[in-house]
Amino acid sequence: MERPNWAPGDIDLERPSVARVYDYYLGGAHNFAADRTVAQKTMESMPELRGVVLNHRAFLRRAVRHLLSCGVRQFLDLGSGIPTVGNVHEIAQAVDPAAKVVYVDIDSVAVAHSRSLLSGNDRVNVLQADVRDPAAVLASREVTGLLDLGAPVAVLMIALLHFVSDDENPAAVVGGYRDRLAPGSFLAISHSGYELEEETESYREARAVYERDVVRTTLRNKAEITALFEGFELVEPGVVRLPAWRPESSNDVEAAQRPFPGFCGVGRKA
């Protein structure tokens, strides 16, 4: 296929990526036929999947607004993906133009497009890095040149940690960031998962398609996700289903009553 001018020359157009499949679910345009094919196959098995992804994005917006109300003005968005409507810097800088954001992703399309979009915004940096290496991320020029780690920072892990296997020790990944954060910093996590008895056949089928063509995932239950907040004090309402975290509509409240396949929470470092 013809390579679009926004696609870096070193990427394989025939291999789906996490960031580009996610972009397609969100209705974005920075994806290829291979990404769209696997996304459509997963939604054939689980038609509600796009709504699940949109709920992760909605939680991001609600969490950032809450963090702004708590006085946070520095954000580290890990696994940030390809820019779309309602990015962290748009939400934060609408409240305070001085708010600072660093986006981190390993996907070259996500990074290239972010840098192009954010050129000229001197309060936003973009870093291409593996978020599973907290020491390298926090020591990078992009982070140290913009964020003051001696002051509160909000670390955002939205739809991220289900791509970190148990063998890769997600608790240690989270701890690597937590231990460098100043008191008063925050952590926001959204994570795919069910309680074991709730997982449906359609979800298993969709997951099998996704894992065959894109990447392995590790689903976790509420207790396992809560454990990732070790060292943080959970803010109300704690770790809950995605639509139930400070819901903004009756639809959110209704969705939260069902076995929604994802949890989220926000914690504060004392």
Image: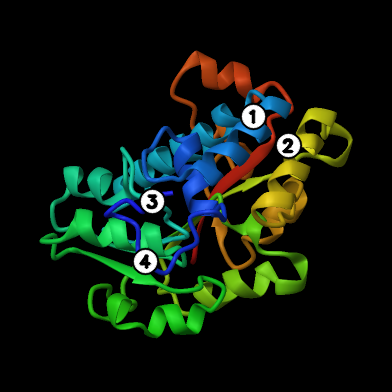
| SS type, badge 2 | helix
* N-terminal-most mark, 1 or 2: 1
Question: Pointer 1: residues within 10 angstroms few (<14), some, or many (20+)?
Answer: some
Residue that badge 4 annotates: 9
**Residue drawn at the location 49% of the way across and 27% of the way down:** 247
Tell me: 185 left or right of 95.
right
Q: Which residue is mark 3?
A: 82
Identified by mark 2, the residue type is Ala
Measured as percent of width and height from the top left, residue 76 is found at 38, 64
Residue lying furthest right: 197
Residue 240 relative to residue 153: left or right = right
> Which residue is label 1 attached to?
43
Q: Secondary structure beneath disc 1?
A: helix
User: Quick one: label 4, few (<14), some, or many (20+) residues within 10 Å?
Assistant: few
Distance of label 4 from label 2 (alpha carbons): 30 Å
For label 2, the residue is 206
Q: Amino acid at mark 1?
A: Met
